[in-house]
Amino acid sequence: MARGRKPGKRTNKTVKVSLPKKTYYILYGIAGNNEMKLNKLIKTIIEERLDNSTIADLSKLLESGRKEKEEAAKEAEE
């Protein structure tokens, strides 16, 4: 017997991405000044990047971000 879907709200994860203004306006222009197309374009770019990356590549990105933050904190202390 088919059980159907569970009652309740479907959950879609929302991710907020900060972009430099210059990059935002370039992508916004490519999307034809349409916010929905811009969101779809950004989603496609991120998905493509994740599809073509290995776990090692992604972990290197995280490590480089941490190193930059640590170096900035050290420079601020000096």
Image: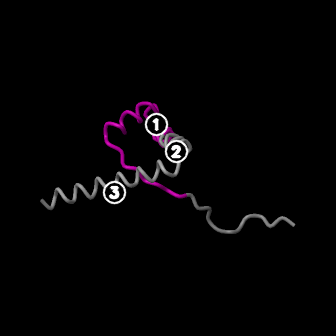
Which tag, 3 or 1, sits closer to the chain's start? 1
Query: What's drawn in magenta, residue-wise?
Result: 13-41
Q: Which residue is mark 3?
A: 66
Q: Position of residue 25 (x, y in %)?
A: 36, 35
Q: CA distance from mark 1 to mark 2?
A: 29 Å
Dot 3 amino acid type: Arg
Q: Position of residue 42 (x, y in %)?
A: 47, 42
Which tag, 1 or 2, sits closer to the chain's start? 1
Q: Looking at the rendering, in which quadrant would you find the N terminus? A: bottom right
**SS of the residue under disc 2:** loop
Q: CA distance from mark 2 to mark 3?
A: 19 Å
Q: How many other residues sit within 10 Å of disc 2, few (<14), some (14-19) or many (≥20)?
A: few
Q: Nearer the viewer, residue 35 or 51?
A: 51
Q: Which residue is mark 2?
A: 53
Identity of the residue furthest to the left in this view: 78
Q: Residue at x 71, y 68 (%)?
A: 6
**SS of the residue under disc 1:** loop
- Horizontal placement of 63 versus 11: left or right? left
Q: How many other residues sit within 10 Å of disc 1, few (<14), some (14-19) or many (≥20)?
A: few
